Structures are given as structure tokens and as C-alpha cells.
Amino acid sequence: MKKFFLQICTLSLCATLSLVSCNTTAHAGKKPAENISNTGNNQKAERDELDKLEKEIRTEVSKVKCTEEKIADWKPAAMGSRSCGGPKYYIAYPKQMASSILPKIEKYNTKEKEFNKKYNIITQDCTFIGKPEAIRCIGDKAEVIYAVE
């Protein structure tokens, strides 16, 4: 009977240690519980920063008047990053601004990709968004045009 009791105790101890070690391994490198409450505030602050950068890009591009005579001076650029891959949309920018606007667009795309990964953002719509077919001037603003299928 003593041998059976020792076996039960040993088995219980091994099971307990296994469960504790799995739990410790699963949470290795994660923030302590007291820091988790700030995650929502951090996420909102980072989203606000992304929105501000996106608005800055749109504002800078919109300062250039689009005319049909100079439509060839405009190009599309992928904007944003969806968790399932690919851009959220394309924006038209004037080629003359390439050196100033493309680094900002790249920064925005990279930051949004990191944001999505960091906060496990799941994109609801993963429809493929291909490059625009053309760019047209609509009310002095350049707009990307997609092929209609």
C-alpha cells in the first residue's frame, strides 16, 4: 500500500510540475499583467499616429492640382497594409513629389503592417486589390481608376 501511495504522489508531483512548466513557457517574454491594462490606450495612440500620417500624405498630395493635360505626371502608390496581405488601396501622387511622398507612404505602410501584427488585427475583406488601370482628374484631384469586370 505504501508503494502505491508513493507512486500516486510521484505521479501527481510530475503532472503538477509539467503543467506549471508549460504555463511558464507559454507566457515567456510577455508583459506582466499590470502592464496589459495599457494595451488599449497604446493601440489607440498608435492608430491615431497612423491616421495622422495618412492624413498628412493625403493633404500633401492634394496640394497639387490635377489637370488632364498633365495626367501623365501622376502615378499610383499602394497605401496601407492588410493583415491578409496587400495594400488597403492605391493613391495617386504627382511624380514631381516622388522623393518626398514615397518615403512617407513606405513609412505608413510599414507602420501599419507592424501595427496589424502587434495587435493581431484581422482584415475582414481580403479581396485582392490590384494596381489601378488609370488615373483621372476629378474636380482638380487625381483619382485612381480600376478596371470594371
Image (cartoon, rainbow, N blue to C red):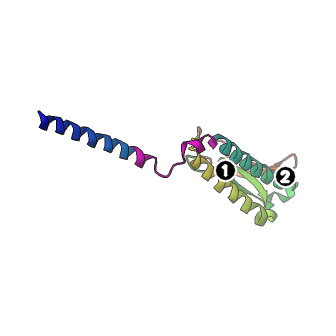
The C terminus lies in quadrant: top right
Residue at point 86% right, 58% down?
69
The N terminus lies in quadrant: top left
Query: Residue 5 at what x, y percent from top left?
Result: 17, 35
Q: Is residue 38 left or right of residue 5?
A: right
23 up-or-down from 111: above or below: above
Q: Type of residue at label 2?
A: Ser
Residue at point 66% right, 42% down?
148
Residue lying furthest top in this view? 1
Q: Is residue 77 left or right of residue 37?
A: right
Q: Type of residue at label 1?
A: Gly
17 or 130, which lies in front? 17
Q: Is residue 132 left or right of residue 67?
A: left
Confirm whether the magenta stretch covers residue 89.
no
* For the residues bearing labels 1 and 2, Cβ distance under 8 angstroms: no
The mark lying in front, picked from 1 and 2, is: 1
Query: Residue 102 at what x, y percent from top left?
Result: 73, 61
Does residue 126 show up? no
* Boundaries of the magenta span: 23-39
- Quadrant housing residue 67: bottom right
**Circle 1: element type:** loop
102 or 5, which lies in front? 5
The residue that label 1 is drawn on is 80
The residue that label 2 is drawn on is 62
Confirm whether the magenta stretch covers residue 27.
yes
53 up-or-down from 1: above or below: below
Does residue 42 show up? yes
**Circle 2: element type:** helix
Residue lying furthest front in this view? 2
Query: Residue 106 at what x, y percent from top left?
Result: 68, 59
- Quadrant housing residue 61: bottom right
